[in-house]
Image (spheres, helix red, strand yellow):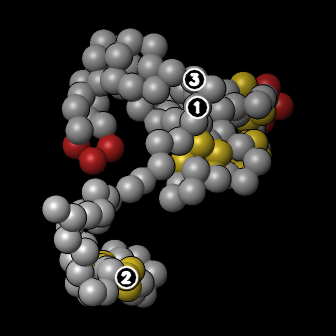
Amino acid sequence: SHVVAAASPRPVFAEPGVAARYEGEIDKGRWDQDRIYGCVCDSSWPVGLGPGQSQEPEWFGPSCSLRHCPSGDDPYTTHVDETNGTNATAAGGYGLGRSGNLLHVDCANRGKCDYDTGECSCWMGSYGHDCTLRSALAL
C-alpha cells in the first residue's frame, strides 16, 4: 500500500553557499526525496581520466552556463608541461589520470579567461586563441 504523509517535504533554502535541506513530513511514495542532483555539463572534447581525455568539461558551473577557454601548455615554462594529467588527482579526489591524460589550463596560464564567452584575453607577450604563442617583440 502507498502511504502519503499529511504534509509533503518542502525545500528550505539557506544563505548562499549553504546547502538546502528538506523539512516537513516524509512522503514514502517519493522515490527522489533522498537524492541530490547536479548537472553533468556538456563538452566538445572528451572528458575523463583516460589517455587523450581532459579532466574538466568545456561547460561548467552549477547550471553549466560557464565555458572554459582553450587549454594549452605555458610556453614560458619549457621544463614542465602544465597539461600533463598523468597520475594527477581528479577534482574531489576521485581517481588519478592515466598516462596521456590532460589537465585543463585556461589560456595556458598566459591570459584571462572570459567564462561567459570562453575566449582568452592574452597578456602582453602572448597571443593566439589559447595564448600559447610567444611574441618576438616581447622577448
The residue depicted at 34 percent of the width and 75 percent of the height is: 19
Name the element at disc 3. loop
| Residue 23, horizontal then vertical, whole percent | 27, 85
Would you say residue 110 is visible in this rendering? Answer: no
Name the element at disc 1. loop
The residue depicted at 30 percent of the width and 37 percent of the height is: 90
Q: Quadrant of the C terminus?
A: top right
- Nearer to us in this view, 138 or 88: 88
Residue 123 lies, with reference to residue 128, above or below; the image says: below
Residue 64 lies, with reference to residue 76, above or below; the image says: below
Would you say residue 70 is visible in this rendering? Answer: yes
* Tag of residue 43: 1
Residue type marked 2? Arg
Residue type marked 1? Ser
Check disc 3 and report the residue beneath it.
45
Residue type marked 3? Trp
The residue depicted at 58 percent of the width and 31 percent of the height is: 43
Residue placed furthest toward the right: 137
Categorize mark 2 by other alpha carbons within 10 Å: few (<14), some (14-19), many (20+).
few
The residue depicted at 41 percent of the width and 32 percent of the height is: 55
* Tag of residue 7: none
State which mark lies toward you, 2 or 1: 2
* Tag of residue 10: 2
Residue placed furthest toward the front: 1
| Residue 96, horizontal then vertical, whole percent | 24, 28
Measured Cα–Cα span from mark 2 to mark 3: 38 Å
Q: Is residue 12 left or right of residue 74?
A: left
- Nearer to us in this view, 11 or 67: 11
Q: Quadrant of the N terminus?
A: bottom left
